Amino acid sequence: MVQRLFIVLGVLAATLAVPGPAHAATLTVTDVMCYNLGSEGSGGGRYGCDPFVTGGTGTYTSFVWGVRTASNPTYYFTTYGNLFGTCVPGRNYTITVTVTDSAGATASNFTAFQCRWGAD
């Protein structure tokens, strides 16, 4: 009886000593950087945006970008990190990105951006 008790306690102690699965760091969009790329042929401006992402599980599977002016929200879906587009010089934009990792976790961040004629 005592021998069985020691076996049960030994198995229980071994089970408690085994660490659980490693957890990935929390998915975070630490920053969104947008920059002017100069003018395009029709007189508008061009811009690019990059997200800075840390943590998460596996690969980043999607990036949903929101480009918003005072009157017009537009959304873009990409499977890569960067966003490039055209803009109206002098207009202010709020650029938002939501990133999803392979486990389905999401994280978002945004930045304010003013379109200009020249490149940064």
Image (cartoon, rainbow, N blue to C red):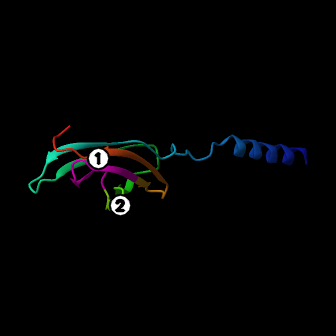
Mark 1 residue crowding within 10 angstroms, few (<14) / some (14–19) / many (20+):
many
Q: Is residue 87 left or right of residue 112?
A: left
* Residue at 42% across, 54% down: 98
Which residue bears the numbered disc 2?
A: 71
Q: Kindly indicate whether the residue at mark 1 contacts the one at mark 2 (C-beta within 8 angstroms).
A: no
- Mark 2 vs mark 1: give the one in front: 2
Q: Is residue 58 left or right of residue 5?
A: left
**Residue 46 percent coordinates (x, y):** 19, 50
Above or below: residue 62 compared with residue 13: below
> Does the segment drawn in magenta span residue 17?
no
**Residue 26 percent coordinates (x, y):** 52, 45
* Residue at 81% across, 44% down: 9
* Residue at 85% across, 48% down: 4
Mark 2 residue crowding within 10 angstroms, few (<14) / some (14–19) / many (20+):
few
Above or below: residue 11 compared with residue 79: above
Which residue bears the numbered disc 1?
A: 49
* Residue at 35% across, 61% down: 71
**Residue 92 percent coordinates (x, y):** 31, 49
Give the SS element for disc 2.
Answer: loop
Q: Inspect the image, locate mark 1, and give the three-letter code of the amino acid beneath it.
A: Cys
Q: Which residues are magenta?
A: 80-97
**Residue 49 percent coordinates (x, y):** 29, 47
Distance of label 2 from label 1 (alpha carbons): 21 Å
Q: Nearer the viewer, residue 77 or 94?
A: 94
Q: Nearer the viewer, residue 31 or 57?
A: 31
Which badge, 2 or 1, comes first in the chain's sequence? Answer: 1
Q: Quadrant of the C terminus?
A: top left
Quarter of the view holding residue 54: top left
Q: Inspect the image, locate mark 2, and give the three-letter code of the amino acid beneath it.
A: Ser
Quarter of the view holding residue 86: bottom left
Q: Is residue 32 left or right of residue 38?
A: right
- Magenta stretch, main secondary structure, is strand
